[in-house]
Structure formats: structure tokens, C-alpha cells
């Protein structure tokens, strides 16, 4: 049966009690009137509180637990923001105007700062933060009003920074150049290992400067990476002058040579136009790449053979272009035959056909596989008990009208005892009988997440069978399944509650 609700640990229970009685424990305030007076007169600032000499990891955990009870306000922040603080996240904080000055005044030893999603905070306030935190190793600015000037400040003041997330910020190429190149033309931010710039205004020009400047960068999620690598191979003084002058940054007196090696492990491209010379540059500059994502590119099938040169490749994601220029047998399967023994993760989308047997034969260690919008899954012979034995996650996104073979589900599910996450969309061939037959052979005792979307042949009977079985289910999502009705949802919800199961159930009614 799924996990039952368990009593909290003594540590967590104690933190919950403190969070629920924070004012009386920390300030000796027992009435609402005294509480309001304390806040109005700022008398709380005169109280040292019980946390002054407590280990900082314990204070950080207590602050997070308090966020589950209430938003942190100024009297909470006064207690939690101490000089020993090393990690702080803005989520769950209700008084940012108090939080930022306290952070600046007290927390110079901060190493990890997460202020993501604070879109209402003025850029000038953010600019005032960075100079005080020279010890930062991780900074998350996702969906904030981070501007180019702030990146210049980060480059100057945070020499130990390893991880910087700039997703969905209004930064431009100029900001990235200011991050990497100082006013004197010298390179800075040289410790960066991970840089995220998705959904920004950064172009290939700025990304080229980043890769030329940051020699330790291993993860860079720029989605036109092959164009950048092609540019980088032809780097010279003329290109450096053109790119830096384009954003009004002076050149260093020392020449910056073109790199012959990049430690990048992740390569991502969503561009429609990808040149073969860009793929060649990737294989030469990034021999240690472990993850390749290629989407929407109008490439020939044989162009994928370049990926065979990545000897450490463990994750491969291929989404065909609108022109369906990539063929599974001519392009993908030869790559799997070479790299398959090392592959742990595989995503295939928008192919006319896929050979499940070919994948199983080539990728014996595969742990996670997702397939979407596949027009036809080819039939195969006898089921093999040596294929897909290591699977932990399986996602099949199909059209309800697609002709799927029940043996495909048997092959994928019968021999993977460590399966944890299942998602099926539009798989009408998946019936109670078939699913029950599979779970009787392979009970999938580690299954924790199940999502069924437009799987019209599944009924509540199988879901009750799952709740009767030994597994670790914590999440069940039932979306638009014809035979899983409102009554079924009520019945399942009642049973989960009555039997104290620690299971999140989500149901959406089927609509024509």
C-alpha cells in the first residue's frame, strides 16, 4: 500500500511548535495588543531572542519551517537574520523592505542567496545588495528586474561565485560582457561553473564572449550553442574588438586567445538553422559533453552521426523539425548503437516511427525515457527480459487515435522493478486488464508518481488495485480520463483520507 501519514520527527515537531508560538517564545508577548504595540514601537529590536548562539543550520531550517506557518515579517527577520547566516531564500518573506537592509547590515558571510520571482523590487535596490556579499557561491535572480549594471557589480564583487541563474531577466549582451570583462579589460567572474540565461535578450554575440571568458563554465543553457561554438573556433583579435566595442567595453592590452577546449557538459540548441560546421566545432571543443538537446533543427539524419564522437554522452534529447528531416532508422538508431551503452536518459519527439526493440537492444542502462508525438511504434518479436531493466521513469505522450501495441507496454514495464514515475497520455490501449497483468508480474514497489491523461480505458478498479498494492505512491494525477468520473474521484479521495494515505490526488473531468 502507499505510504501512510507519519507523525513528524521530534526535531520538526519542535520547530512547528516554535513557529506557531513564535511571539510568546521569542518575545514574551502573549496578547494581540502587546504584539501590535511591539511592532509599532520597534521594541522587538531590543530583544536578542533565543537563537543568538544556536547553530546556523538549525536557524535556517527553523526559518523555512516558520514559512510554512506564516509569512516572515520584521520581528521574524530580526531573529533569523544573524551574522552567521550562510543561506537565505526570499520566498515566504512578507516584508522585503525590512529584509534587504537587515541582510546588508548583518549577513556579509552569505554564500547562497535566492531572490527569484521578486519582480516588484526596484533594480536600484538589487544593485545595493551585491557589493556586500563577496562570499557568494550561488545567486538565483530568476524573474527579477536584474539589469546589465547589476551583472557588472556581480563580476567585480563576487569572485567566488559558482552558480548564477538569470532566467527571464531583462539582461542583454552588454550585461554578460560586463559580468565577464572588467573596466580595464581583464577577465572576471572566473569561478563560474553554471550560468543560466534562458528567456533573456542575450544573443550569440554575448554568449560567445561568455564562453571565451569563463574557462571553468560547465553548464550554460544558451539555446543556440552550436552557432556560438562555431564562432568561438574562429575567435581572433578582430572578432574580440568587434564584440567588445559593440557593447562599449574596452579591450585588454593582453590578447585573448581562442580556446581549444571547453569543459561544457551540456549542449542545448532549439534553433531551426544549425550548420554542420557548428556540430563539428562542438565535437572538437566539448569532448566531455554528457547531455545534448537538439530541437527543431532542419538537419539531415546523417548529421546526427557527429554525436557519436561524444564518448561521455549519457543524456540525449531529439525533437524533429516541422519538416521531419530526421529519420529514426537512418539517423537516431546508429547513434544509439554507438552511444546507447552509456545512455541513461532519452527523449524522442515528433518522429514518424520509432523502434522500441532497437532502443532496448542498444540502451541496456536506460533509466529515463520519454516519447512524444510518435506516429508509429514499430512491431517487434518476442518480449526480451534483458531490455529496459533499469527504467525508473517512463513518459508516453500519444494521440488517443494512435494504434499502440499492448506488447510495447509489456516490454517497457514488465522488467523494471525500480520504476518510480509513470506518465501516459492518450494511450487507449492501456486497459485495467493489461495494467493489472503487468503489475502482477512486476509490482513496481518503488512507484511514487502516476499520471494518466486521456487514458479512456482505465477505470477506478485499477486505481483501487494500485492502492491495495505495495508501492510508494505519493502523487496520482488523473486528467480527462473518460471512465474516471467525479464519483470515482470522490471514492478515491475518501479512501485515501479514511486509510490515512500520504497521497496527493489530482483529478480533472473529461470534456468532449
Image (spheres, rainbow, N blue to C red):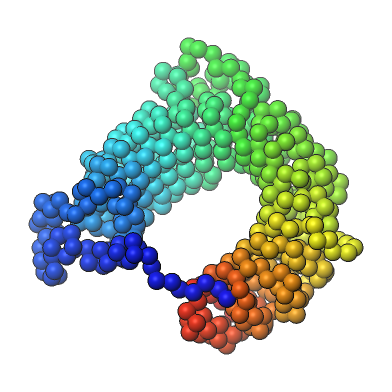
Whether residue 319 can be seen here:
no
- Rendered residue at 50%/22% (across/down): 245
Q: Is residue 87 left or right of residue 512?
A: left
- Horizontal and vertical percent for residue 19? 27, 63
Residue in the foreground of this view, choosing between 284 and 319: 284
The image shows residue 350, relative to residue 221, as above or below, that is below
The image shows residue 211, relative to residue 42, as above or below, that is above
Residue in the foreground of this view, choosing between 33 and 392: 392
- Rendered residue at 22%/52% (across/down): 51
The image shows residue 320, relative to residue 203, as above or below, that is below
The residue most toward the front is: 10
The image shows residue 87, relative to residue 454, as above or below, that is above
Which quadrant of the structure image shows residue 302?
Answer: top right
State which quarter of the image contains the N terminus: bottom right
- Rendered residue at 82%/68% (across/down): 407
- Rendered residue at 45%/47% (across/down): 142
The residue most toward the right is: 381
Q: Is residue 459 left or right of residue 149?
A: right
Q: How many marks?
A: 0
Whether residue 239 can be seen here:
yes
State which quarter of the image contains the C terminus: bottom right
Residue in the foreground of this view, choosing between 339 and 188: 339
- Horizontal and vertical percent for residue 116? 41, 49
- Horizontal and vertical percent for residue 225? 63, 36
Residue in the foreground of this view, choosing between 481 and 60: 60
- Horizontal and vertical percent for residue 125? 30, 42
Amino acid at each position: 500500500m502507499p505510504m501512510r501519514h507519519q507523525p513528524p520527527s521530534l526535531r520538526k515537531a519542535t520547530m512547528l511548535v516554535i513557529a506557531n508560538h513564535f511571539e510568546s517564545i521569542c518575545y514574551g508577548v502573549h496578547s494581540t495588543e502587546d504584539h501590535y504595540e511591539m511592532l509599532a514601537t520597534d521594541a522587538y529590536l531590543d530583544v536578542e531572542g533565543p537563537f543568538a548562539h544556536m547553530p546556523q543550520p538549525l536557524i535556517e531550517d527553523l526559518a523555512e519551517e516558520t514559512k510554512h506557518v506564516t509569512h516572515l515579517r520584521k520581528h521574524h527577520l530580526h531573529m533569523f537574520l544573524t551574522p552567521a547566516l550562510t543561506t537565505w531564500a526570499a520566498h515566504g518573506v512578507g516584508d522585503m523592505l525590512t529584509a534587504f537592509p537587515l541582510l546588508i547590515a548583518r549577513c556579509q558571510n552569505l554564500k547562497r542567496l535566492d531572490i527569484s520571482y521578486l519582480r516588484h523590487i526596484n533594480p536600484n535596490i538589487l544593485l545595493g545588495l551585491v557589493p556586500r556579499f563577496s562570499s557568494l557561491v550561488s545567486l538565483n535572480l530568476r524573474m527579477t528586474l536584474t539589469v546589465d549594471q547589476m551583472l557588472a557589480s556581480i563580476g567585480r564583487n563576487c569572485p567566488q561565485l559558482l552558480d548564477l541563474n538569470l532566467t527571464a531577466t531583462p539582461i542583454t549582451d552588454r550585461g554578460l560582457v560586463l559580468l565577464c570583462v572588467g573596466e580595464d579589460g581583464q577577465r572576471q567572474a572566473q569561478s563560474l561553473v553554471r550560468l543560466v540565461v534562458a528567456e533573456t535578450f542575450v544573443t550569440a554575440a554575448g554568449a560567445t564572449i561568455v564562453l571565451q571568458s569563463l574557462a571553468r563554465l560547465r553548464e550554460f543553457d544558451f539555446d543556440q550553442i552550436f552557432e556560438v561554438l562555431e564562432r568561438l573556433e574562429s575567435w581572433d583579435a578582430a572578432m574580440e574588438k568587434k564584440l567588445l566595442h559593440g557593447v562599449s567595453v574596452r579591450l585588454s592590452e593582453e590578447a585573448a586567445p581562442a580556446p581549444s577546449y571547453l569543459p561544457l557538459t551540456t549542449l542545448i540548441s532549439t534553433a531551426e538553422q544549425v550548420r554542420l560546421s557548428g556540430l563539428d566545432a562542438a565535437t572538437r571543443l566539448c569532448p566531455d559533453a554528457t547531455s545534448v538537446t537538439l530541437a527543431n533543427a532542419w538537419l539531415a539524419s546523417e548529421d546526427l552521426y557527429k554525436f557519436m564522437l561524444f564518448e561521455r554522452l549519457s543524456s540525449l534529447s531529439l525533437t524533429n523539425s516541422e519538416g521531419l528531416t530526421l529519420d529514426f532508422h537512418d539517423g537516431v538508431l546508429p547513434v544509439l548503437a554507438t552511444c546507447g551503452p552509456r545512455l541513461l536518459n532519452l527523449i524522442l519527439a515528433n518522429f514518424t516511427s520509432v523502434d522500441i526493440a532497437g532502443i532496448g537492444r542498444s540502451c541496456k542502462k536506460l533509466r529515463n525515457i520519454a516519447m512524444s508525438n510518435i506516429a508509429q511504434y514499430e512491431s517487434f518479436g518476442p518480449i526480451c527480459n534483458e531490455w529496459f531493466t533499469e527504467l525508473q521513469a517512463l513518459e508516453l505522450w500519444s494521440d488517443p487515435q494512435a494504434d499502440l501495441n499492448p506488447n510495447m507496454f509489456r516490454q517497457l514495464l514488465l522488467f523494471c522493478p525500480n520504476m518510480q514515475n509513470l506518465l501516459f497520455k492518450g494511450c487507449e490501449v492501456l486497459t485495467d486488464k493489461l495494467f493489472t497483468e503487468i503489475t502482477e508480474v512486476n509490482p513496481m514497489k518503488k512507484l511514487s508518481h502516476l499520471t494518466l491523461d486521456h487514458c479512456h480505458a482505465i477505470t477506478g478498479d485499477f486505481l483501487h488495485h494500485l492502492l491495495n498494492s505495495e508501492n510508494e505512491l505519493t502523487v496520482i494525477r488523473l486528467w480527462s480520463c473518460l471512465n474516471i468520473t467525479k464519483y470515482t474521484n470522490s471514492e478515491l479521495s475518501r479512501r485515501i483520507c479514511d486509510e490515512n494515505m500520504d497521497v496527493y490526488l489530482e483529478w480533472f473531468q473529461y470534456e468532449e
